[in-house]
Structures are given as C-alpha cells and as structure tokens.
Image (tube, grey):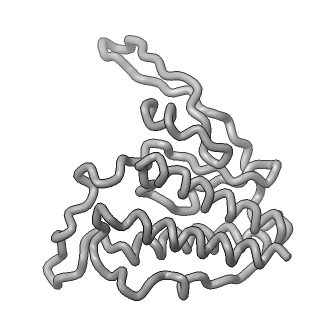
Amino acid sequence: EWELGKILKHPNIAEVYDYFTEPKNGEIRSYIVMEYIEKLPENTLSESSAVQAALGLVDALIFGFQKGVIHRDLFSENMIVNREGILKLIDIDSFDHMYEDLYDPHAADSSGTPMDPLDGYLKVMEGGVSYLLAFGGINRNLGHLIPSDCHRNIQEGDLPTILEYLNAVKEVLHSTEG
C-alpha cells in the first residue's frame, strides 16, 4: 500500500503520507499514515457537484491506468465524497499492478464464463459513476458505452479499450454539466 501510495499522487486518490513499523507484543506492526477525509452525508450534492465527483472518479481511474495500476475493489465504500464535494478513492491496497498475475486470459468457471471479464470490470466502473451521480439526484445509465466485444477476460492489450470507455464516459459527463 505504501509503495502504491507513493506513485498514486492524484487529487481524487487519498494521499499516503508516511509508513512506519514498531514492535508490539513481540511482533513488528506496520502502519500507514493517510489523508483524513471527512465524508459528506449522502444525497447532499447538487447535480453539478455530483457530476464533478463522477468526473473525479474517472480521472483517478485514468490516472491509475496510466501508472499501470487498476483498482480491484471499486464499490461505494471505497469512494468518499469529502465535505468540499471532491471524490476520493480510498483503500489504496485495492490498487494493483496490471497484468502481474491478476488476470489469466484463459481462466473460466465451470460453465465457461470468463473469471475476470473485461465487460464486468467496465460495468463496475459504470456503477461507481452512477453511484456518484445519484448523490445529486441524477439517474444516468452509461452501460450502453461498454463495447459489445468485451465479454472475455481482461488481457494485456486491453488498456486502450478501458481508456476509450472512460473517455466516452467523460464526454457524457461533460455534456451533463451543461
């Protein structure tokens, strides 16, 4: 988490300040000092602030992909909108380097369904954006932006597809602003 925190310096990702260890009960315990984020109560954002929070999520994800990391646990509890209306991705430990034993392009369950489907991950990202938009009372389905040829495991060459999808989401969000 400390190593990832050093490379994930972005306004929409919780900042990691320090790492230290200390002995406790005969063991060495590790600690990470992170940014404190005071959570905004749900459903208290204006529409424009909700769009800005969703854009922050997309920007943070794009930034991570550009650094070669993917957030593997993207759900509401790992997205905090602070009192200023700024989205912060937390749980830095859920970021992981892409393609380092994360995805086996041939892995499938007993019915032949891909174990790490690209379309599934894109749907999770879309769900995160929709969750943030709902803070401002916006009901927007962005699932139609997911390419139809993505029902397969994530593969090393999929970064352009993921970035293309996220940029399409950004375009829709920007059109929602006006």
For image coordinates 23% across by 81% down, the residue present is 113
158 versus 2 height, above or below = below
Q: Quadrant of the N terminus?
A: top left
Task: Look at 74% across and 52% down and name the residue there.
Answer: 86
Residue in view at x 74 percent, y 49 percent: 82
Residue furthest left in the image = 110
Residue 48 location, x and y as percent?
Answer: 83, 68
In this rendering, would 82 be left or right of 29?
right
Number of labels in the image equals 0
Q: Nearer the viewer, residue 60 or 67?
A: 67
Q: Position of residue 93 (x, y in %)?
A: 43, 43
In the rendered image, which quarter is residue 18 located in?
Answer: top right
Above or below residue 159? Residue 5 is above
**Residue 41 in which image quadrant:** bottom right
Q: Where residue 28 sits in the image (x, y, percent)?
A: 34, 16
What x and y, as percent, mark residue 136?
79, 71
Residue 126, compared with residue 96, is above or below; it is below
Instruction: Please give the name of the residue rendered at 34% of the width and 53% of the height, measured from the top-left corner.
Output: 98
Image quadrant for the C terminus?
bottom right
State left or right for residue 110 relative to residue 80: left
